Image (spheres, rainbow, N blue to C red):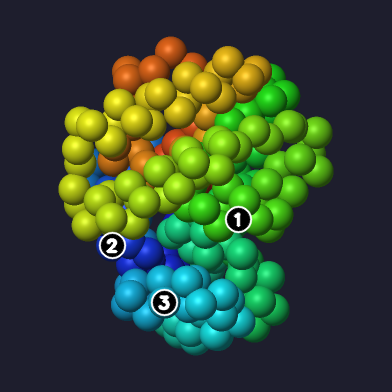
Amino acid sequence: MKTIGLLGGMSWESTVTYYTLINQGIHRKLGGLHSAKILLASVEFQEIETCQALGDWEKSGDILADYAKGLEAAGADFLLICTNTMHKVAPQIQAQLGIPILHIADATIERLQQEGITKVGLLGTKYTMTQDFYKERIIEQGIDVLIPNEKDVEIVNKIIFDELCLGEIKEASKEQYKAIIAKLQAAGAQGIILGCTEIGLLIQQEDVKLPLFDTTEIHSAVAVEKALNE
């Protein structure tokens, strides 16, 4: 079994889900008392979020790269960045590593292709929804990406940072997300990417009819396969 490096803490709420899903996945595959070989570096999220707000992505990339190099030195065979947004600096981090980063968008693209999705709605932080680093990776694979309107982008983003990252789950916010998903469906979306690792805390498949692609679940499942099969 390979050792999985998790670069987490962004937020720690979703990192808990990664840890749980990966261990559950290993146990389903192997049974008995088997669990995952995991090395976890959990960063101070306020420091990273401040860099995001200031647009200082290079500084945030340097911070994460230092943690990533520590995971590699400790014996990680590959790395997961446990957040969608900070994949903006994945190339900067990868350039300083000798082990591969398992990219969350690539894992999601593979699942979308398996399901025959050609037009998908994307929910996430405002950075993930409006900047090209994530969307373009999907579009390059022949899948159209729809995002909410400007007002709804702010609603989605505010709920992530002001509630979900703090572990607050509110029914009113769930209803707002469901309404935004309905708009994306009306615009032609065949499925919805939950493109922030916290959104799955609020919205589950039973809440909507449109297929949901929870990136935390997808990323974790691919990590399990890579740990066992390569």
Q: Which quadrant is the N terminus positioned in?
A: bottom left
User: What percent of the width, then of the height, locates residue 94?
Assistant: 65, 73
Q: CA distance from mark 1 to mark 3?
A: 23 Å
Which class describes the residues within 10 Å of circle 3: few (<14), some (14-19), or many (20+)?
few
Secondary element at tag 1 = loop
- Residue carrying label 1: 103
Q: Nearer the viewer, residue 28 or 157?
A: 157
> Residue placed at 55% from the left, 57% from the top?
127
> Residue placed at 56% from the left, 18% from the top?
185
Amino acid type of the residue that numbered disc 1 sits on in the rendered structure:
His
Secondary element at tag 3 = helix
Let me know if residue 168 appears in the view: yes
Of the two numbered discs 1 and 2 on the same chain, state the one appearing first in sequence: 2
User: What percent of the width, then of the height, locates residue 80?
Assistant: 49, 61
Number of the front mark, 2 or 3: 3
- Residue carrying label 3: 50
Q: Quadrant of residue 87?
A: bottom right
> Residue placed at 20% from the left, 52% from the top?
167
Q: Nearer the viewer, residue 180 or 225?
A: 180
Number of the front mark, 1 or 3: 3
Q: Quadrant of residue 39?
A: bottom left
Q: CA distance from mark 2 to mark 3?
A: 16 Å
**Please, is residue 139 above or below residue 171 in the view?**
below
Query: Does 122 sit left or right of 37 as displayed?
Result: right
Query: Does 88 sit left or right of 4 as displayed?
Result: right
- Residue carrying label 2: 12
Amino acid type of the residue that numbered disc 2 sits on in the rendered structure:
Trp
Q: Nearer the viewer, residue 159 or 48?
A: 159
Which class describes the residues within 10 Å of circle 2: few (<14), some (14-19), or many (20+)?
some
Of the two numbered discs 2 and 3 on the same chain, state the one appearing first in sequence: 2
> Residue placed at 46% from the left, 58% from the top?
83
Secondary element at tag 2 = helix
